Image (cartoon, rainbow, N blue to C red):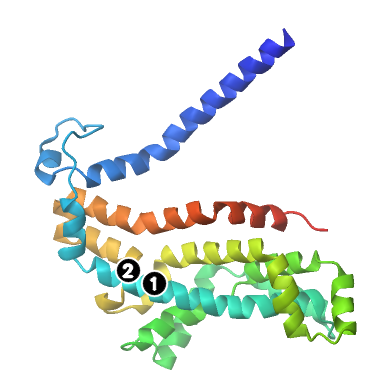
Amino acid sequence: MIENKKNISKVLIYLLLFVWALIVLFPFYWMVLTSVKDTAAYNNEKVPAFFTMKPTLANYVKAFTEVSLGRYFINTLIFTAATTGLMMLVTIPAAFAFARLEFRGKNLVFALFLSLMMIPNELVIITNYATIVNWGFQKGDLTYLGMILPSVTSVFYIYLLKENFEAIPNELYNAARVDGTGDLKYLLKVMVPICQPTIVTIVILKVIECWNSYVWPRLIARESKYFLVSNGIQAIRESGFGRQDIPAMMAAVVAVSVPLIVLFLMFRDKIMAGVSRGGTKG
């Protein structure tokens, strides 16, 4: 009797999870389905069709030929790679300093550092915008610097990595110092490899953040040739192309979304390991 109740409970749980999965995945399915529909057939649908017998890739060709979607991709790759790389160059040494080095006022400095998370983003955007404009980083190729520089630090990521570094036993650090190993070598040879899942997680989260950035790049990029994919999609939507050709618009959205999905599927194990490690200590 008890075994039957457990089986029924499992069936109900899996059924609810299946229904929830359908609800969550349906918008993406509808987006992909619309992107492979013929434009004329889509416009003639009086009742939305939940499948198509004649899929086409013509909408993807339109998305890359009739608008500057390829240019938006290149801009986003430059912005994402540069921002993520510079952020890791700042985050890893900063986390190591707070986790292992001893200096006067360290706890106070770190508390003040964490307090920056309490500042509303709107205030930070206003301050950063005034600074970037005064420095002239809205002109020509300097636009890239204007978009990148305010995003190379993250209090949260430094805090997350610091907690992981502190979970590494002090005995390893003390033994390395006795052997004459410097702090930089110990960081690169010991701490970074041990905390690799968390570092990979931070990198992927930052890549996703950069890829989806909209407000700040839109404020800085005055010319459309410097738009990122998020700004480009919005520009396409507001243009006649996006309003008149919904399937091509959906094809552009799918093309923008696929890289992030592939990235997550490739590194999902490391992401899960990094998140679980960040939630435990010791």
Q: Residues within 10 Å of mark 2 (few under 14, many from 20)?
A: some
On the rendered image, what quadrant is the C terminus found in? bottom right
Identify residue for label 2.
73
Quick one: SS at disc 2? helix
Q: Residue at x 43, y 91 (%)?
A: 134
Residue type beneath disc 2: Phe
Residue position marked by numbered label 1 in the rendering: 77
| Residue 35 placement (x, y as % from top left) | 23, 47
Asked whether, in this view, residue 91 is left or right of residue 71, the answer is: right
Report the front residue among 47 and 13: 13
Q: Residue 87: where, in percent of width, then height?
A: 56, 76
Residue found at the far bottom of this picture: 135
Which quarter of the rendering shows the N terminus? top right
Snapshot quadrant of residue 187: bottom right
Closer to the camera, 57 or 178? Answer: 178
In this rendering, is residue 278 above or below 107?
Answer: above
Q: Which mark is residue 159?
A: none
Let me know if residue 248 appears in the view: yes
Q: Is residue 59 left or right of residue 265?
A: left
Would you place residue 103 above or below residue 273 in this image? below
State the separation of the CA atoms marked 1 and 2: 6 Å
Q: Are marks 1 and 2 in contact (CB under 8 Å)?
A: yes
Query: In this rendering, would 111 be left or right of 57?
Result: right
- The three-letter amino acid code for the residue at tag 1 is Leu
